[in-house]
Amino acid sequence: MKDVLQEITRLRTKRDWTEYELAKRAGITQSTISTWYRKNQVPTVPSLDKICQGFDITLSQFFGEEGDSITLTEPQRELLDHWAALTPRQRQVVRDLMECMAQRDSED
């Protein structure tokens, strides 16, 4: 069974987000998130669903293990549809842009 708080931390730090940033994106208070960690409480399903929305992932993606089939959110599905229409050169440009954006975000 996946450690929910550990997974939230992993996803948050992977994005270089503070608890405040996650709270803002998920539409919950930072004190709520802090309380989960302080009291070692697992969030309720509705709260966890908000957290997943903040990360722009589904609950099945949150709980999925590597190699599991996953369900995509509508924005993810649209992105993949656009990706499929790109030429190999265009895909490389998009990857380069995303890498540049990720590096820039980590510098801010």
Image: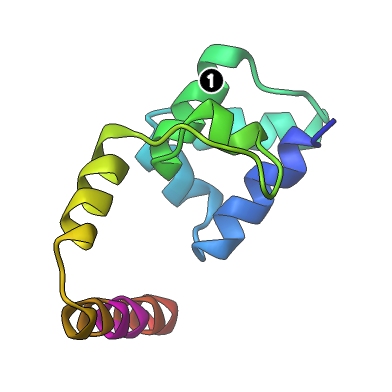
Residue 33 against residue 102 in the figure, above or below? above
The location of residue 53, given as percent across then percent down, is 40, 32
Q: Which residue is mark 1?
A: 47
Res 60 → quadrant: top right
Q: Quadrant of the C terminus?
A: bottom left
Left or right of 7? Residue 102 is left
Q: Residues within 10 Å of mark 1 (few under 14, many from 20)?
A: some
Q: Is residue 40 magenta?
A: no
Q: Which residues lie in the magenta part?
A: 95-100
The location of residue 85, given as percent across then percent down, is 14, 61
Residue 13 against residue 94 in the figure, above or below? above
Regarding residue 29, the answer to whether it shows in the image is no
The location of residue 102, given as percent across then percent down, is 38, 76
Q: Quadrant of the N terminus?
A: top right
Query: Along the line of sight, which residue is nearer the eye, 94 or 84?
Result: 84
The location of residue 19, given as percent across then percent down, is 54, 48
Query: Along the line of sight, which residue is nearer the eye, 41 or 52?
Result: 52
| SS at mark 1 in the image | helix
